[in-house]
Image: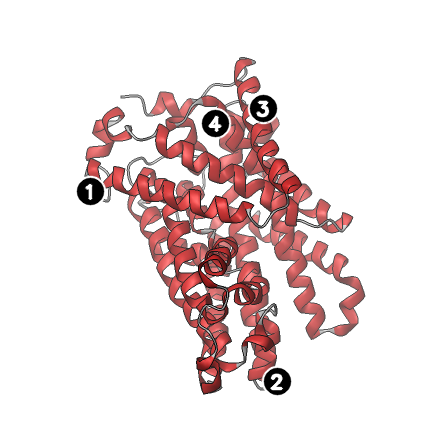
């Protein structure tokens, strides 16, 4: 039995905001400040804008087609088969990243309860287990939990902004706005782009969305705009209350402890840091399951991953996601290299995908004529150009933070993914159902 479509624009936007505001802003803001000082406000705005443009093709396709399987179905319909296979494997591997949220939540909990400081691995494993147990009830329950936590997160981040402005120190204005110049600004922008990803998770909820051709792309845009404003205010509050030397390299929790009364600080840690991480984890769990099911239905993965419960929950896929997510927690692995190995191939796919889908309006004229954004073909091409430029800039400045070995590893992972896609398709076990459904 298929789940009812329950997610409206507010629900989808809440999940999008929760997917964006997560571990990155609470752990990486100080690093961005280190590179660009008070220019972090500009870096965050540029990063949010660049990330939205990099993946705007997903919004444009969502406004044109109503399809099951989210981003996977988009890839299967519009891109060469081996690209689709590579994307299917990226979705599976990316579930390792969910452990980041659980581990970070455990570290914040340990700050509140020092007795748990030596038990963070266990706490993270319990968190991962609990959140998957919540998500197996379906997207309706996830949306209710997300909505509550997002509202409280807004309050906590609002308090951080207010106390940052209250503690405004005029001495910070005499410090250089961008102390490390344009290179520092662009490096910070590339690094902050890691904190700006997540809105396109909404595409993967098309199955559960009401009026997806309208609500999905609009929710991606709304969540991007909301997070841009929130991030800019957070960056201003962090750099206008304390000096560059005090905040460079520090996380939000450190800054909050310096500018907030103890009671408010504890609320910020719970309602801000922990709830932001929680919404990211829930958003990731809910968004990734259906694309993996769709890839298994087409033959990229074993057929066992197509099984669902009577209520329609894909329990085998969720079990796989859970096991992949919990392995790094149990093993105490560092995920920094894994994250970079996912982001660079994804950016390469984005650039190539823009070129391949250039003629989508001509290939699917009927669907394009009915796109929810009523966009002209010329405007579509303009956005694809902007998307490609944004992806190239972010990729180049991401790779500049890597060693030569890291660069080779990133490119090697990209090559492996596409080789896998090519060989799997040539095996004859793959059938792209989305192409049959949307043939005109």
Kind of element beneath mark 3: helix
Query: Callout 2: few (<14), some (14-19), or many (20+) C-alpha neighbours within 10 Å?
Result: few
Tag on residue 374? 1
Q: Residue at x 23, y 26 (%)?
A: 362
Q: Does the image show residue 138?
A: no
Q: Position of residue 361 (x, y in %)?
A: 24, 30
Q: Position of residue 279 (x, y in %)?
A: 53, 58
Quarter of the view holding residue 4: top left
Tag on residue 83? 4
What whole-number distance in Å separates the C-alpha atoms at marks 3 and 1?
37 Å
Q: Is residue 260 above or below residue 304?
A: below
The residue carrying mark 3 is: 420
Q: Nearer the viewer, mark 2 or mark 4?
A: 4
What whole-number distance in Å separates the C-alpha atoms at marks 2 and 3?
53 Å
Kind of element beneath mark 1: loop
- Contact check, label 2 and label 4, Cβ < 8 Å: no
Q: Residue at x 75, y 57 (%)?
A: 121
Q: Residue at x 22, y 41 (%)?
A: 379
The residue carrying mark 2 is: 262
Mark 1 or 4, nearer chain start: 4
Kind of element beneath mark 4: helix
């Amino acid at each position: 039995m298929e789940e009812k479509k329950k997610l409206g624009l507010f629900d989808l936007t809440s999940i999008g905001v929760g997917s964006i505001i997560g571990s990155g802003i609470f752990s990486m803001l100080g690093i961005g400040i280190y590179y660009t000082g008070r220019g972090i406000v500009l870096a965050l705005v540029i990063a949010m804008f660049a990330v939205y443009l990099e993946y705007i093709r997903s919004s444009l396709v969502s406004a044109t087609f109503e399809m099951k399987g989210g981003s996977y179905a988009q890839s299967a319909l519009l891109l060469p088969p081996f690209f689709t296979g590579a994307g299917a494997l990226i979705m599976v591997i990316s579930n390792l990243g969910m452990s980041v949220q659980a581990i970070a939540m455990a570290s914040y909990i340990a700050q509140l309860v020092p007795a748990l400081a030596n038990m963070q691995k266990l706490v993270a494993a319990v968190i991962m287990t609990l959140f998957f147990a919540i998500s197996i009830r379906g997207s309706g329950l996830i949306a209710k939990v997300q909505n509550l936590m997002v509202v409280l997160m807004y309050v906590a981040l609002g308090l951080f902004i207010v106390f940052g402005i209250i503690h405004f120190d005029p001495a910070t204005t005499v410090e250089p706005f961008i102390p490390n110049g344009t290179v520092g600004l662009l490096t910070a922008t590339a690094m902050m782009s890691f904190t700006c990803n997540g809105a396109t998770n909404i595409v993967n909820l098309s199955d559960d969305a009401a009026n997806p051709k309208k609500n999905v792309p609009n929710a991606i845009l709304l969540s991007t705009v909301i997070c841009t404003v929130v991030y800019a205010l957070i960056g201003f509050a962090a750099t206008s209350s304390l000096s560059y030397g005090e905040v460079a390299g520090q996380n939000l929790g450190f800054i909050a402890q310096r500018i907030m009364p103890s009671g408010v600080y504890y609320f910020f840690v719970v309602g801000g840091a922990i709830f932001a991480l929680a919404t990211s984890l829930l958003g990731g769990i809910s968004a990734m399951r259906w694309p993996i099911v769709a890839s298994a239905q087409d033959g990229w993965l074993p057929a066992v991953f197509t099984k669902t419960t009577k209520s329609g929950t894909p329990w085998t896929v969720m079990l796989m996601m859970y096991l992949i997510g919990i392995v790094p927690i149990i093993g105490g692995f560092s995920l920094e290299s894994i994250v970079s190995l996912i982001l660079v191939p994804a950016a390469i796919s984005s650039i190539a995908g823009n070129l391949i889908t250039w003629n989508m309006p001509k290939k699917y004229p009927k669907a394009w004529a009915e796109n929810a954004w009523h966009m002209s073909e010329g405007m579509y091409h303009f956005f694809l150009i902007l998307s490609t430029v944004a992806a190239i800039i972010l990729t180049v400045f991401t790779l500049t933070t890597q060693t030569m070995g890291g660069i080779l590893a990133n490119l090697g992972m990209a090559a492996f993914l596409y080789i896998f896609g090519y060989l799997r398709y040539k095996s004859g076990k793959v059938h792209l159902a989305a192409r049959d459904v949307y043939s005109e």
